[in-house]
Image (cartoon, rainbow, N blue to C red):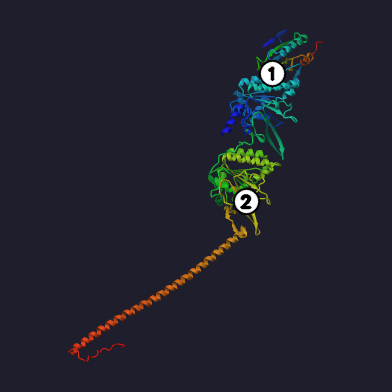
Amino acid sequence: MKLKRISSQSMERTLPKCPTGIAGFDEITLGGLPRGRPSLICGGAGCGKTLFGIEFLARGAQDFGEPGVCISFEETSDDLAQNAISLGFDLKALERANRLFIDYIHIDKSEIAETGEYDLEGLFIRIGSAIDSIGAKRVLLDTPEALFGGLNDEGVLRSELRRLFRWLKDKGVTAVITGEKGEGTLTRHGIEEYVSDCVVLLDHRLQSGVVTRRMRVLKYRGSMHGTNEYPFLIGQKGISVLPVTSLGLNHKISDERISSGIPGLDEMLEGQGYYRGSSILVSGTAGTGKSSMSAHLVNAACARGEACLYFSFEESPDQILRNMRSIGIDLARWIKKGLLHIHSTRPTAYGLELHLVEMHNLLEQHKPKVVVVDPLSSLMSGAGENPGDLTNMVLRVIDRLKQLGTTAFFTSLTSGGHAAEATELNISSLVDTWLLLRDLESDGERNRVLYVLKSRGMAHSNQLREFLMTKNGVELREAYLGPAGLLTGSARVAQEARERDNELMLKRESEDRRLALNRKLRAAEAQILALEAEREAAQLELKTAAIENENRRTSALTQRADMARSRKVNSSPKAPRPQIPEAGV
Amino acid sequence: MMAIKKDGMARPEYDLRLYVAGQTPRSVQAFANLTKICEEHLAGRYRIEVIDLLVHPQLAKGDQILAIPTLVRTLPEPIRKIIGDLSNKERVLVGLDVRSTE
């Protein structure tokens, strides 16, 4: 980190840069054009050289406090001002504010005759006085090679042009010189590219019927720069070079989790859903429910009050609304509330770059928290024969969304028969969470299953779940794993029924057993009661017998006493027998 | 501005302006060549105005001056320009559209 800072500082010391303010250009040149040096912008007709220069001047005057001089050899100042208005720059106002000076240099060969030696000191004086009049720091020479059309002595012109570049350098102004591309050379006369410190090549070409503009930094003395071809666009706010994002990987990440809108899926993702700001890819064959999953996410986000942006490349907004209504998701109310914006375009409507820029613009405009691109794979057609372009573009989109902390949800159609775990886009390594939807064919039916192929930063479930579309949206069912493998659909239903039967049988059996035992218990209890009663009866009998015995003994004694009393004698030798016979004896 | 006027202040037939940038040898040469040609062919019918752009840089815009030296014929119309040190007399005369004195 420390090292890096030192090196970047030393670089700044050796080569100060002049920010152009052109979106994206300053990123690929790591700061802008070389300050105080001439740079060449070259390209064919209509590639946007002049616009580049005008934007460089106008942004300098507007945003960086650096007045500029425009020396135009081709267009009058009125024409230039008119053209710039379409890019949102008011050159006339800048001129009135002394922040811009436009000089139109017109050479008409028919009114000029040449005799003897000359130089272009007049041009130098004009440029010099223009620079001095407003203290300009930036200069645009719009196609000085037009001089070659007006003057005959090429030798003089060549040396004078070289002198001009040197002179501009001595003046300390950051100059942009435009040049028409020649055959085999960058410029018609092959001077400018050698005397410029930075050369930028603009280009527009037709690819699969779609025009794309590209930019490449060919040379940049004393500085690193992005060497790739970058697509760029001329839009309503001037030129934007893509990537609009930085080249680094330094976006802030969030620990916050957001629901996928499908409870079963949240459960698979640690019960909490996706990370906010992560990028999610759902791939699957046709009709596996990718859009439905998008709708769930959008629905959940809108319910939380977050703005959502839905890019649809296959369905119109109305069609999406109708289809999602059929699974019980009402997206229309979010549109009415202004939370959801559905942007439908045909992928072939324009080139990838324009799609990308439109995405960027809409992101700026709506500032959504959740973005859905459905399906990403249909953009393939826009990429033409160069699928790498799409990967690049997706990388840029993901980069941008990550920077904004926006959750991105991409769907990708995989064609049947392919290995399901290979997306044609090669973007699977770029996304954080990858869900796979698959069709399983068994028992004469097709069923959908979903699994989480990867999900960075969480312990996700490794289970295959059956994926059902119901009137109330998507439901995830636990898939049955039987001895015969995964069971889905009616096989699963049959298995469920079997298990239900089993359970019922078991239940009945145990109930029977319980009843039998109960009966046994009750019988034993009854027996206990009977025996008890018997015991009590015996006890009672025993007691009465004892009492009777006692009674008899006492009554015998009293009888004897009575008799003795009646005989009035002491007891005779022949004691009479008691009269009362002993019962039963 | 070193303006050299010759022969009659009232509307000369040929009104010429010579743009220079300082007293460079080439400028001096051009001026010498010009006066010579004028004296030979346009005696009494011309006026030469020499404009030094180092002194008056803003004047370069009006006549669309790029090359130095540039001779501009403002009268008679239309405007004609001759650039260079005017060393080729014939071409200067053609450029100024002066018929050789018959």
- For residue A250, which quarter of the picture? top right
Q: Which mark is residue A437?
A: 2
Judge whether residue A482 can be spotted in this image. Answer: yes
A532 lies above or below A108: below
Classed neighbour count for the residue bearing mark 2: other residues with Cα under 10 Å, few (<14), some (14–19), many (≥20): many
Horizontal side of residue A521 vs B56, given as left or right = left
Element at badge 2?
Answer: strand
Mark 1 — on which chain does it sit? A
Which residue, given by chain and number where applicable, does mark 1 sit on? A122
Horizontal side of residue A528 vs B66, given as left or right = left
Q: Earlier in the sequence, mark 2 or mark 1?
A: 1
Element at badge 1?
Answer: helix
> Mark 2 belongs to which amino acid?
Leu
Q: Residue furthest left?
A: A568
- For residue B76, which quarter of the picture? top right
In this orientation, which residue lies closer to the viewer: A429 or A367? A429
Quadrant housing the N terminus of chain A: top right
In this orientation, which residue lies closer to the viewer: A169 or A469? A169
A476 lies above or below A275: below
Q: Residue at x 56, y 64 (%)?
A: A502
Judge whether residue A104 can be spotted in this image. Answer: no
> Mark 1 belongs to which amino acid?
Gly
Mark 2 or 1, closer to the camera? 2
User: Do pointers 2 and 1 mark residues of a single chain?
Assistant: yes
In this orientation, which residue lies closer to the viewer: A564 or A17? A564
In this orientation, which residue lies closer to the viewer: A96 or A359? A359
- For residue A465, which quarter of the picture? bottom right
Q: Position of residue A494 (x, y in %)?
A: 60, 61
Q: Position of residue A246 (x, y in %)?
A: 61, 36
Quadrant housing the C terminus of chain A: bottom left
Q: Residue at x 66, y 41 (%)?
A: A390
